[in-house]
Image (cartoon, rainbow, N blue to C red):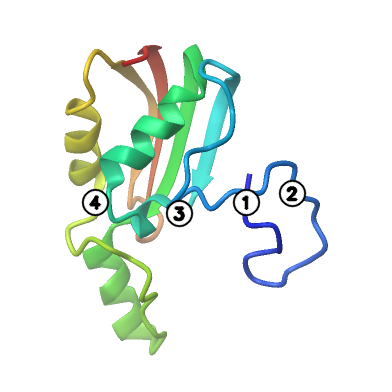
Amino acid sequence: IDFSSPYANTGKDKVDIACDVINEPIPVKNDTYDYVYTSHLIEDFEDTFKGIFEFIRILKPGGNLILVFPDQKKYEQHCRQTGQPLNTYHKHADMSRDFMINVLNQLPNAEYKILFESNCQIDYNVILVLQILKNG
């Protein structure tokens, strides 16, 4: 699931489902997938709750949600140290592991179990692998 043309002109990968997941519902039935993997996207959602809810909606009960996203403060520090420009699509100055756990804890009737997490142990990235036990 991605834009109909590659995000960064990195290749000619085929997109099975063309969708702007930030602004459109994912055109997939509830409880469809065993896992959802998203890397460096959720920080671009103005409404993080809505994005997480949508990812969980398309997961089968017991499925895994894999989130990879930057800790914004550490990311900004990295950019300052390396002279790299900031990604202007990031929406939350406080994006972090704790921010995401707070969003997850607000989901109605959803239960999850953390299977794996890395909170900036290598760089500025947070990795959460969650088993979604009950969909909201």
- Relative placement, left or right, of 25 versus 105 is right
Query: Which residue in the protein does label 3 denote?
Result: 41
Q: Position of residue 98 (x, y in %)?
A: 18, 42
Q: Earlier in the sequence, mark 2 or mark 3?
A: 2
Q: Earlier in the sequence, mark 3 or mark 4?
A: 3
Circle 2: residue type: Val
Res. 93 image quadrant: bottom left
77 or 15, nearer to the observer: 15
Q: Earlier in the sequence, mark 3 or mark 1?
A: 1
Q: Are marks 3 and 4 in contact (CB under 8 Å)?
A: no
Q: Are marks 2 and 4 in contact (CB under 8 Å)?
A: no
Query: Which residue in the protein does label 2 denote?
Result: 15
- At 64% across and 71% down in the image, what residue appears? 8
- At 38% across and 69% down in the image, what residue appears? 89
Distance from label 3 to label 4 (Cα)?
13 Å
Circle 3: residue type: Leu
Image quarter in which the N terminus is found = top right
- At 50% across and 21% down in the image, what residue appears? 59
Query: Which residue in the protein does label 4 denote?
Result: 96
Q: Earlier in the sequence, mark 2 or mark 4?
A: 2
Q: Position of residue 51 (x, y in %)?
A: 37, 41
Query: Which residue in the protein does label 1 denote?
Result: 2
2 or 123, nearer to the observer: 2
